[in-house]
Image (cartoon, rainbow, N blue to C red):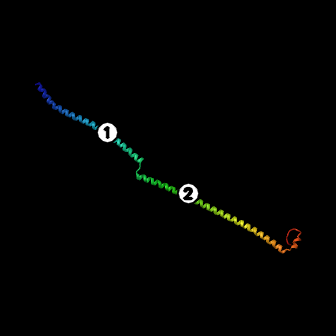
Amino acid sequence: MQRRKQKINILSNLVIYRRKSMIFRTIYLNMQENKNFKRIIEKIDYFRSVSLKKKAIKLLKSITLFQGNKEYEEKIKSRTENLLFKYKDSMKKQEDDLLFLIQQAEEKLKHENRKKIQAKLALDQMVLRGVSALNMQAISLSQNSLNCNIFKMINLNFDGFRCL
């Protein structure tokens, strides 16, 4: 009987043990799931943080280093327009300076031409005065020779050929 009691006791306790084991199993599985879940969450957080870091670095890289095609084209276009505008301004200034220098050179040339013409006219005037003076002397000599006769010229005692 004792054996039977033990069996009954074991069977009655078996239900309790089964319940306890089921509870223990569920608790253990929950704990394991919680651990796995925590590990999974930690891994997800790690990958999320790494991916956020990668995205942040990629965003910073794209903002600082890379530009879109349209932005780059606009930047290059504005840069070339500015360079062309500066180049045109410098060329315009050089053109104005060259025109000013050409105008000054033309004025100097006109002034020099005037001086040359004035010098030439003065020289011609001097030559004409000299020629007219020579002509006047030649006329006076011919007039003297026509007015005076040869005998009077001999009587001058060789002082010159002047008529009295």
Task: Specify the amino acid type for callout 1.
Answer: Lys
Residue 79: give x, y in percent of width and height. 47, 53
**Residue 121 to residue 45: above or below:** below
- Residue receiving disc 1: 43
Residue placed furthest toward the top: 2
**Residue at 55% of width from left, 57% of height from top?**
94
**Residue at 49% of width from left, 56% of height from top?**
84
- Residue receiving disc 2: 94
User: Which disc number belongs to residue 19?
Assistant: none
Relative depth, front residue between 163 and 6: 163
**Residue at 38% of width from left, 45% of height from top?**
58
Q: Residues within 10 Å of mark 2 (few under 14, many from 20)?
A: few
Relative depth, front residue between 106 and 2: 106
Residue 72: give x, y in percent of width and height. 43, 52
Residue 138: give x, y in percent of width and height. 79, 70
Please give left or right for residue 52 compared with residue 18 in the image.
Answer: right
Q: Quadrant of residue 158?
A: bottom right
Residue 115: give x, y in percent of width and height. 67, 63
Task: Specify the amino acid type for callout 2.
Answer: Gln
- As measured in the structure, the alpha-carbon distance from the residue carrying label 1 to the one carrying label 2 is 70 Å
Q: Secondary structure at mark 1?
A: helix
Tag 1 near tag 2, CB within 8 Å: no
